[in-house]
Image (cartoon, rainbow, N blue to C red):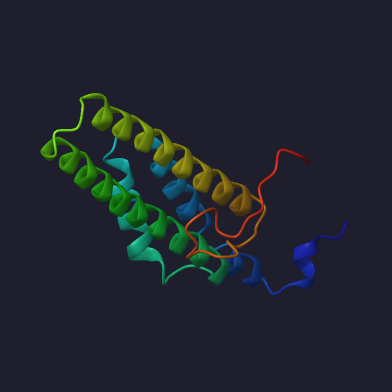
Amino acid sequence: MTSNSATLPSNATQADERGTKLAAVVYVLFLGSVLAVVTAPVGVLLAHLRRHHVADWIATHLQFQIRTFWLGIVGAGLCLAAWHVLGLVGASAWAPWALGYGFFTACLIWMVGRCGVGIHRLMAGRAIDAPRSLWLGGARVSLHD
């Protein structure tokens, strides 16, 4: 019985997978932030600290995760500022509520979508094509197989 690893140096597979579990843990921490907000900062801290100690293709996942966190923080700050401005200008009571719930729902869908694409590509052993993108990392998402 022949194994694929027989043709590779003994450390090649390990080097290529270095950091895979870390990236998976960070994705889980990000998804866990839906219930406990504190897990996302822990995840981004792990990604920041270990991003130079992983395989190159895993580094794209960590960069994607770091960007997801910071874009979420910027978006939340902008929403909070808009919510505050709506209160200052005397907008009707439904406007800040609609903004808050609408934005929160959109951010939740965006974050879960990015994590879903990232986990799918991680489990397939693929890098994130465009880790600095604002949307889904260059992935084409469809409902077809």
**Residue occupying image coordinates x 22% and y 43%:** 80
Q: Residue at x 53, y 69 (%)?
A: 55
| Residue pictured at 35% horizontal, 50% vertical | 72
Instruction: Pinpoint residue 119: horizontal percent, then vertical percent.
Output: 56, 47
Is residue 132 positioned above or below 25 on the image? below
Q: Residue furthest bottom?
A: 9
> Which is more toward the observer, 34 or 136?
136
Q: Residue furthest right?
A: 1
Residue at the outermost top position: 94
Q: In which quadrant of the rendered image does the C terminus lie?
A: top right
Coordinates of residue 70 in the picture (x, y in percent): 33, 56
> Which of the two residues, 126 or 130, is positioned nearer the viewer here?
130
x then y, percent, for residue 74: 29, 54
Q: Which of the pair 84/51 is nearer the observer?
A: 84
Direction from residue 144 to residue 63 in the image, left or right: left
> Which quadrant of the rendered structure holds the N terminus?
bottom right
Quadrant of the rendered image containing residue 22: bottom left
112 relative to 61, above or below: above
Residue 89 on image: x %, y %: 14, 39
The total number of labels drawn is 0
Q: Residue at x 70, y 43 (%)?
A: 142
24 relative to 92, above or below: below
